[in-house]
Amino acid sequence: MLSVPSSSSSLKVQVFDKDTFSADDSMGEAEVAVQPLISAASALGNTGISGTMQIGKWLATRDNALVRDSVINLVDGRVKQDVFLKLQNVESGELDLELEWVPLDQ
């Protein structure tokens, strides 16, 4: 769980393997735009809507590391987003993340 200010635009993630007898090796990095999730959650507000529906989308382009479009959903009153990213500064690799917006007052 991370506390992310609403003014944040992205989160940089560095991925390492876990070695028992030597130093951990870098497996790449990726940058996650959190603003689409923040914007969708803010626009929804505290409406008390439950159920499941799509409330936003972050499109895969040449300018970002998305493997495919990332949909932001409302699932049982929670704002969630699955993100599939290509790792950067490495020959190959992908990172799958599930983001969930949790207001600080919860």
Image (spheres, rainbow, N blue to C red):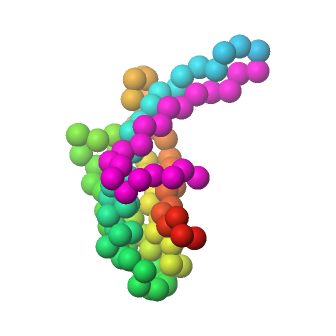
Query: As rendered, which of 50 and 39 lies closer to the eye?
Result: 39
Q: Main secondary structure of the magenta part?
A: loop
Q: Find residue 21 and report its image quarter.
A: top right
Query: As rendered, which of 96 and 13 lies closer to the eye?
Result: 13
Q: Residue furthest top?
A: 22
Q: Find residue 67 and report its image quarter.
A: top left
Instruction: Give how far across and how far down residue 88 sits, in percent.
Output: 39, 29
Region in magenta: 1-20
Q: Residue at x 38, y 77 (%)?
A: 45
Q: Residue furthest right?
A: 21
Q: Find residue 20 and report its image quarter.
A: top right
Instruction: Give how far across and how far down residue 53 sits, in percent.
Output: 41, 78
Specify whether residue 78 is painted magenta: no
Instruction: Give how far across and how far down residue 40 sits, in percent.
Output: 34, 67
Task: Determine if residue 85 is in view.
Answer: no
Q: Residue at x 24, y 45 (%)?
A: 61
Instruction: Give how far across and how far down residue 37 sits, in percent.
Output: 38, 60
Tell whether 1 sits left or right of 35: right
